Amino acid sequence: MTSARGAALVDLHTHTVASDGADRPAELVAAAAAAGVGVLAVTDHDTVAGVAEARAAGRRLGVEVLTGCELTASVGDRVVHVLLYAEGLLEPDLAEGVEVARRGRHERNLAIGERLERLTGVGYGDAVEAAGASTLSRAHFAKALMARGVVADVAEAFDRYLSSGRPGYVPAPSVPVTDAVALAAKAGGVAVLAHPGRLAEAERDRVLGEALEAGIDGIEVWHSQHDAGLRWSLAELAERRGVLATGGSDYHGRHKPAVQLGTGLDGNAAVLTGCLDALRGRLASEGPAA
Ligand code: AMP
Ligand code: MN
Ligand code: MN
Ligand code: MN
């Protein structure tokens, strides 16, 4: 068997069917090995449920798998995503802490279903069917609305019903960014603000400032949705503020088919080796902090 250990690529942001990715954890690791990724962090939304299977596959295939997750968090009234990296997250009480926002998601999905059912006749059960093995999200409500002919495409589903401010919208539950930072510290690891490029430019600096104020340990610089200018300015900010610069593709398998493991889109998610070394320097070698 060929080994990916020593392979050049690093990917610190990926999803499996434990959240809204398309690949089972072992499939993700096999795809990473095939793509030349030697170090892979599994970062499902609000859960570490896919990590154990990924680590076992990593041992077989020679891919180093780091334990992570992507928490749904809030900075003031903005919902943001915060990547946690820490082996200690696998401890049962900390894994439980990661699941807080996820449990609230079920209530949220029921509430979205109720609203849509009233508005369109398409409800929770239709979205569950559209989701198949994936974790339910607004994307599946959009798919169900499309399948039933209520809208022509996903964009229309979001524009008319599912985006913030539209009649089917219910905000996602989130944990305050300070709690995300504390959870990472307790687990012996770090919290990194994910893809700041998704924030509207007008509020990006404010949210970054508040996240840094809250003690965030790093900024995701290399990401499939970040252009060269943004990557440069985020790297400069991380250096100036003395926090980690990380990156990853945000791979979701066939749910986002253009995004490649290890490189993102046209190489925009490729992580510099020195940044991996800096991250490693901040991860406790064993378990959570006392
Ligand atoms: P949720 O996590 O339930 O809020 O849903 C997020 C999902 O909806 C992700 O898969 C997004 O890619 C998708 N999504 C959010 N906004 C839009 C939009 N305007 N058009 C298409 N997909 C969207
Ligand atoms: Mn996702
Ligand atoms: Mn995200
Ligand atoms: Mn992600």
Image (tube, rainbow, N blue to C red):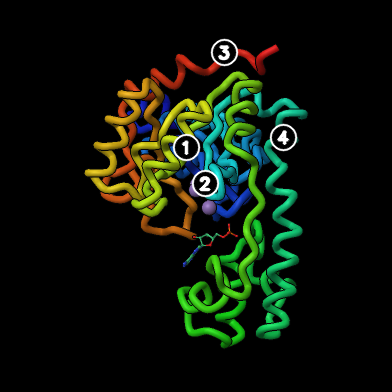
Per the rendering, the mark at residue 132 is none
Per the rendering, the mark at residue 193 is 1
The three-letter amino acid code for the residue at tag 2 is Val
In what element is the residue under mark 2? Answer: strand
* Residue located beneath label 3 in the image: 285
Mark 4 neighbour density, 10 Å: few (under 14) some (14–19) many (20 or more): some
Mark 3 neighbour density, 10 Å: few (under 14) some (14–19) many (20 or more): few
The reply, left or right, for residue 48 in relation to residue 103 is: left
Disc 2 and disc 4: Cα gap in Å? Answer: 17 Å
Disc 4 and disc 3: Cα gap in Å? Answer: 21 Å
Q: Which circle's residue, 4 or 3, is located before the other in the chain? A: 4
The quadrant holding residue 68 is top right
Mark 1 C-beta to ligand 3 under 8 Å: no
Q: Does residue 26 appear in the picture of this structure?
A: no
* Residue located beneath label 2 in the image: 80
Disc 3 and disc 1: Cα gap in Å? Answer: 22 Å
Measuring 54% from the left and 31% from the top, which residue is drawn there? 58
Mark 1 neighbour density, 10 Å: few (under 14) some (14–19) many (20 or more): many
In what element is the residue under mark 1? Answer: strand
Measuring 40% from the left and 25% from the top, which residue is drawn there? 244
